[in-house]
Image (cartoon, grey):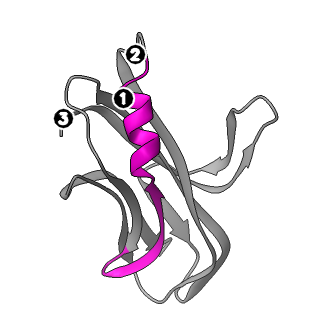
Amino acid sequence: MSVNQYAAIFCDDFRLEVNGKFSLIGCYGPDLVVQQFPARLPKLCAFATMSLSIDDPCKSIRVVFLNKQEQLGEITFPEEDLERQFQAEGAKALFINGVVDRQFITFDEPTELHLMAEIDGEEIVLGKLNVRATS
């Protein structure tokens, strides 16, 4: 499966607007900086966006939010939805957006979070976020 473009944005929260747009609140750069460990956050979100080639349709997409080997959340896109979108008349690419969130997350030490896509069994890193302390 060829992914033409992909990105991940990590943030404190998100909102789905009436017009179908996402609003992302409190977006992080490469680091999430806490004062000290352990650190507890009320919520942490990972927004995934992918542009997939219409010439190479896939049957399965699963997006997973990970802290080391611990799964924090996931989204699975149904095969029938993917098939219908890939076959849409006039489609040049398939655009996928989704948010995975985790409430009440605790970090005991510095770590690197990952947002991964599994497309027809192939793993792709969409983005990473380093969690570190100020000192």
- Dot 2 or dot 1: first in sequence order is 1
Mark 2 Cα within 10 Å, few/some/many (few <14, many 20+)?
A: few
- Bounds of the magenta span? 67-88
| Res. 129 in view | no
Closer to the eye: label 2 or 3: 2
- The residues tagged by marks 3 and 1 sit, at their Cα atoms, a distance apart of 14 Å
User: What residue is at 31 percent from the left and 52 percent from the top?
Assistant: 60
- The residues tagged by marks 2 and 3 sit, at their Cα atoms, a distance apart of 16 Å
Left or right: residue 40 versus residue 128 is right
Mark 3 Cα within 10 Å, few/some/many (few <14, many 20+)?
A: some
Q: Amino acid at mark 1?
A: Phe
User: What residue is at 35 percent from the left and 14 percent from the top?
Assistant: 92
Residue at numbered disc 2: 91
Q: Quadrant of residue 130?
A: bottom left
Q: Considering the numbered disc 3 on the image, is that residue within a helix, a strand or a loop?
A: loop
Q: Amino acid at mark 3?
A: Ser
Q: Position of residue 4 (x, y in %)?
A: 25, 28
Considering only vertical position in the picture, is 88 above or below 1? above
Q: Position of residue 25 (x, y in %)?
A: 70, 48
Does residue 85 belong to the magenta stretch? Answer: yes
Closer to the eye: label 3 or 1: 1
Residue at numbered disc 1: 86
Is the residue under label 1 in contact with that under label 2 (CB below 8 Å)?
A: yes
Q: Position of residue 15 (x, y in %)?
A: 74, 47
Q: Considering the numbered disc 1 on the image, is that residue within a helix, a strand or a loop?
A: helix
Residue at numbered disc 3: 2
